[in-house]
Image: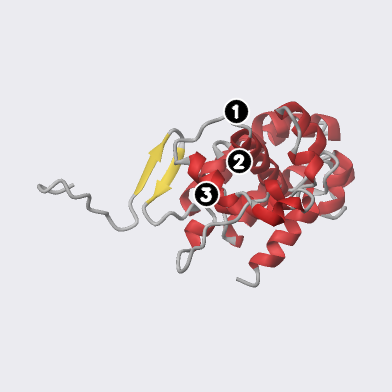
Amino acid sequence: MNNNNTLMETEKSKLKDIGVYISSDLKWAKQVKYAASKANSILSLLNNTFKYKDKDLIKTLYCTYVRPNLEFSIQAWSPYYTKDINELEKVQRRATKMIPELRHLEYKKRLEILGLTTLETRRLRCDLIQQFKIFKGIEIIDIKQNQTMNSICSSGPAANIRGAKHRMKPELVRNCLKRQYFFSNRVVDGWNSLPAEVVQSTTVKSFKLNLQSVDLEAITNKIKTKKAYY
């Protein structure tokens, strides 16, 4: 900040706040590397500590000690570049390969046997749960949320369409890729893909339960396909 109290941006400066690296260019490469490195270090420690690695043990260890490092405050820094998404996913790929009887299987099959999803699909689920809390007023986000919700929720004749009154509209953004992936924008396609009965859940617990009937992986792939055309 200069003598005129004007904020001066340092080129690609980075600040660590509450455990998350925030970059002035709003890219998350450093945070992704930090999270992946920390998770990989713990995974290596677990791999060297436990001689017998059955699938239940490895799943429990991974979900308890490794995965939380890949998802800490993830709503704030959810990666949008393919290379960053893949870097986080590599950690889970490595973890599932630690199980001898699953090592020869494809990644998707390993996840199916372990009852896991890709980290990208989990991030979608987390976003949807957060949006439900905002939608129901359970959590109040101080970003003019009332005005935002009023502007993005459909009204008028379209509201008669099944579930339309709960649909959202993204902010129109041009020439700013980072803003397209702010939480309020990136959650739109996933939220609009939910059945009305899921959105109309009355509690967070029932919403999570109803989400189990939704193919979130299919929604994730649909969103990825749409992104490819941007």
Q: Secondary structure at mark 2?
A: helix
Q: How many marks?
A: 3
* Residues at marks 1 and 3, CA–CA distance in whole angstroms: 33 Å
At label 1, the amino acid type is Ile
Which of the two discs, 1 and 3, sits closer to the camera? Answer: 1
Q: Nearer the viewer, mark 3 or mark 2?
A: 2
Q: In the figure, is residue 187 to the left or right of 221?
A: left
Secondary structure of the residue carrying numbered label 3: helix
Question: From the viewer's perspective, is 168 left or right of 112?
Answer: left
Q: Amino acid at mark 2?
A: Leu
Q: Residue furthest bottom?
A: 229
Instruction: Name the N-terminal-most of marks 3 and 2.
Output: 3
Q: Sort mark 1 into few (<14), some (14-19) or many (20+) by Cα contacts within 10 Å.
A: few
Where residue 43 sits, quadrant-wise, is: top right
Residue 3, above or below 84: above
Residue receiving disc 1 = 138
Give the class, few, some or many, for how many residues have Cα within 10 Å of label 3's Cα (few <14, many ≥20). Answer: some
Q: Nearer the viewer, mark 1 or mark 2?
A: 1
**Looking at the rendered structure, which numbered label has been put on residue 70?**
2
What residue is at 48 percent from the left and 58 percent from the top? Answer: 178
Mark sitting earlier along the chain (1/3): 3
The residue positioned 53% from the left and 59% from the top of the image is 180
Question: Which residue shows up at 59% across the image and 31% down it?
Answer: 137
Residue occupied by mark 3: 33
* Residues at marks 1 and 2, CA–CA distance in whole angstroms: 25 Å
